[in-house]
Amino acid sequence: MHQSAPVAACDFVVFGGTGDLAFRKLLPALYLRDRDGQLTPDTRIVSVSRAGLSDEDYRDKVHAEVRAFLPPGTFDADAWAAFRERLYHRELDVTNLAAYQDLAKVLVGGEDRVRAFYLSCAPKLFGPVSRNLHEAGLITEKSRVVLEKPIGTDLASARRINDEVGAVFHEHQIYRIDHYLGKETVQNLLVLRFANMLFEPLWRSGSIDHVQITVAEDLGVGGRGGYYDDAGALRDMVQNHLLQLLCLVAMEPPASVDADAVRDEKLKVLQALRPTGPGDVVRGQYRSGAVSGAAVAGYTEELGGPSSTETFVALRVGIDNWRWAGVPFYLRTGKRLDRRSSEIVVQFRPVPHSIFGADGPPLSANRLVLRLQPDEGVRLHLMTKEPGPGGYRARGASLNLQFSETFKTRTPDAYERLLMDIVRGNPTLFMRRDEVEAAWTWTEPILAAWAADAVGPKPYAAGSSGPAAAIALIERDGRTWHEEEST
């Protein structure tokens, strides 16, 4: 198997280093890359937060918190001991310029290495933190800044954040992260499309009936209720994750995998999105129910009060260009659903004529399923003949590519790949400013329509597949949502 090469020496500075994202994703990813030899011996990881922790206190806290989020079998005592020594903590009020001098002290001696400032904090702080980093003299030519989603809550706030950060950092230094773009299957989509003659000639309206993109979660909002109630499923998932997946499915072949070549084509898709009509969008909110046999509370019960925030969205999306004219893209995402699954389904058109006659076997159209989680892989559904004499007994069968089985290796987490791309200076899998703003331009009218709608989201039981209106959304077109098969 291919072994990833070490990256350049780096100082990772994580604002919000005692937060949920740092413990669940960032620190496990950095440990795994260190364990596999990608971090140089002098690479440092500096946590910034308001917690009054010494370096040793922070190292103990990371040890206690992070081990639970490591994949089974990946903890190694010697590797962890070495990783532990990379960790530092600085208590800092990010709005206080004078406080940045303490951060400057720990970074002394690293002026010639990559500095990655990871802003895992509230988006309203992106601008002030960037400005204070500049005023404190901490930004070098090799610095990058990483912005977690959401980039704003609407187009105006997104532009304001982009202006504030862009006043300090050049665009090539700004990495707007969407971890879905780091998933193995998402990247494999580009290889499947553009490295196989089998697919690209058929990747258009003449051969494809429709496309479905589903990101389903069985969990509720948990401890993110405060953030989530201000965001909702449209801002939290659709405006970024789902639209980015749609772009990779629908974009024209770029001239190369150069970052701007890929992002130019994604931008064209966003600019070609047809505005949604009143019947193209369904929003829902989960009520109490049962998930995996366990009773769970409804959204407002978890939140502790009434709310009109959506926890589920389904959309029918059109792309107004030659390749996709007349092909609907069905998108859905929600919390407290009956399963945890993320997948892209490309449904091909049926054959135009069956040579087997009216009494012949029923033929199912081909379908390509790209599974993002869990168990990343690709499945192609075909028609084949059952073995044996006595005529044509056709049945559906699948060519199943599961990455873990085929390549006999652990699939790295998306953050592992994206963090290393940040150090390498490769922005291909990150969003450019114009992409973010184009996505908000398309999304804003939906938010405006909801603000004027007194009805609110449609209820659905926790543990179901979402509100009935989402089923009607696709079935009125004579289609059905794809449901997960056993592997």
Image (spheres, rainbow, N blue to C red):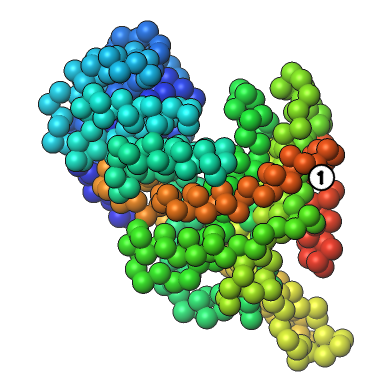
Residue at 34 percent across and 51 percent down: it is 427
What residue is drawn where x is 40% and y is 11%? Answer: 51
Label 1 SS: loop
Q: Is residue 79 left or right of residue 235?
A: left
Give left or right: position of 359 versus 315: right
Identify the image quadrant of residue 256.
bottom left
State the residue in front, 464 or 285: 285
Tally the numbered discs: 1
Does residue 221 appear in the picture of this structure? no
Percent from the top left, x then y, of residue 209?
69, 73
Depth check: give the residue in front, 234 or 165.
165
Q: Is residue 47 visible?
A: yes
Q: In the image, is residue 482 above or below residue 204? A: above
Q: What percent of the width, then of the height, locates residue 75?
A: 38, 29
Quadrant of the rendered image containing residue 127 = top left
Q: Out of 153 and 330, give the one closest to the viewer.
A: 153
Q: Quadrant of the N terminus?
A: bottom left
Judging by the rendered image, the residue that carries numbered circle 1 is 467
Q: Amino acid at mark 1?
A: Pro
